[in-house]
Image (cartoon, rainbow, N blue to C red):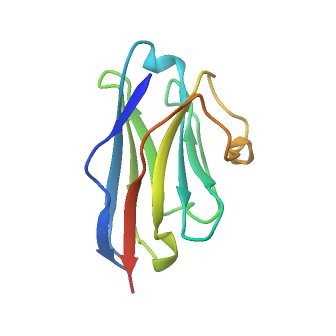
Amino acid sequence: LRFSCRRGGGLVQAGGSLRLSCAASGSNFDDYSIGWFRQAPGKAREGISCISSSGGNTHYADSVKGRFTISRDNAKNTVYLQMNSLKPEDTAVYYCAAAHIEYVLSIRELLPQWGDYWGKGTLVTVSS
């Protein structure tokens, strides 16, 4: 499985919105749970959201809950992260990752070493 992160990152003012997407090439995309991670300057990578292989189960970190929405379109081999009400503290490089599992039980499973395949990051900068 190989990811290419589409357009979506960039500079936005606080309170604004962005949608990130990652498209996967390869087979059996719908056998993978997908996670979104981010890494801010000087900080460790953190898992912020995850979606099950079918799309029926999602998890969010408290820092983004209620503002971000993860979704996927298995017919298009694509996963999305809709980010609303962005804050300066959301500034980070965002990554998608895939793990060959049906679902996770908790966002706490998204440790930095989670995932079998990783996309290249995309920078999101939120100005105050």
Name the residue at the bottom extreme. Answer: 128
- Against 4, residue 62 (above or below) is below
Q: Residue shown at 44%/39% (left/top)?
A: 119
Residue 14 screen position, x and y as percent? 37, 80
Residue 96 screen position, x and y as percent? 48, 42
Q: Residue shown at 61%/66% (left/top)?
A: 63
- Against 75, residue 49 (above or below) is below
Residue 36 screen position, x and y as percent? 52, 46
Where residue 12 sits, quadrant-wise, is bottom left
Name the residue at the left extreme. Answer: 7
Q: How many labels does the image show?
A: 0
Q: Is residue 23 left or right of residue 107?
A: left
Q: Residue shown at 33%/66% (left/top)?
A: 17
Query: What quarter of the picture does the N terminus occupy?
Result: top left
Residue 43 screen position, x and y as percent? 63, 67
- Against 68, residue 29 (above or below) is above
Q: Is residue 81 left or right of residue 115?
A: left
Q: Can residue 83 be seen in this view?
A: no
Q: Can residue 53 be seen in this view?
A: yes
Name the residue at the front extreme. Answer: 42
Q: Residue shown at 38%/16% (left/top)?
A: 26
Query: What quarter of the picture does the C terminus occupy?
Result: bottom left
Q: In this view, does 35 lie to the left or right of 30?
A: right
Between 33 and 4, the one nearer to me in the picture: 4
